[in-house]
Image (cartoon, rainbow, N blue to C red):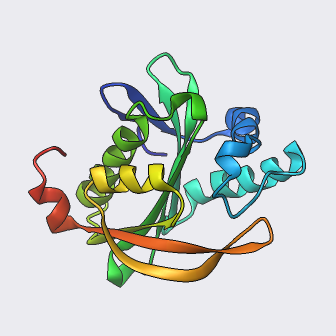
Amino acid sequence: MNNPISTSNLILREISTEDIESIHQLNSIPEVDQFNTLGIPNSIDDTKVIIHSLIQAQIEIPRIRYVWAITSKDNKFMGLIGMNLGKLNYRSAEIWYKLNPIYWNKGYATEALKSVLHFGFNELKLHRIIAGCATENIASMKVLEKSGFIKEAHHRKILPIRGQWIDNYEFAILEEDFHRDKNN
């Protein structure tokens, strides 16, 4: 298991079974679900199945998935951020994040994302990290852009959300972009 990632306001630590209730509550908030392809879980048992598979991924070799609980310095659960690695020779990954709405618009998502980018580019030696974002998710687009991502593509009707197909923007950041930005 990796050591927690610490920032000025946050601690990112790998999820554990103790987080199941907090994760279930997060995934059950309608505002959080608005752009979520998984939908609101039917029960905590659904959440347990997902979380147990994510925890199992922590010990797989090679490691292809990371999921961190975003917590405050006093250990309040704030949300999740994750990274799924692509094919080894491509040195790429895709990131995602979700935060409890009480923590929105305070810079926490950007702070967490930048710390995961640092981990990806400096520890894992990745070349490229992508993120998808529903075209109507303006707040998430701002987080990505503040973190150095560039919008590269518009995918039409690719996200299955609540029985509808939703358009998606694909953003990316390269290792050279990340290392060029002096704010990282």
Q: Is residue 132 above or below residue 96?
A: below
Q: Is residue 4 visible?
A: no
Residue located 57% across and 38% down the image: 79
Q: Is residue 28 above or below residue 90?
A: above
- Whole-percent x and y of residue 8? 30, 26
Residue located 36% across and 55% down the image: 144
Q: Is residue 174 above or below residue 156?
A: above
- Whole-percent x and y of residue 116? 36, 49
Residue located 57% across and 63% down the image: 60
Drawn side of residue 183 relative to residue 85, left or right = left
Q: Is residue 176 above or below residue 109?
A: below
Drawn side of residue 46 relative to residue 62, left or right = right
- Whole-percent x and y of residue 97? 51, 50
Drawn side of residue 38 relative to residue 96, left or right = right
Residue located 82% across and 51% down the image: 41
**Residue 5 quadrant:** top left
Q: Is residue 114 visible?
A: yes
* 49 vs 162, nearest the viewer: 162
- Whole-percent x and y of residue 154? 45, 79
**Residue 38 quadrant:** bottom right
* 139 vs 59, nearest the viewer: 139
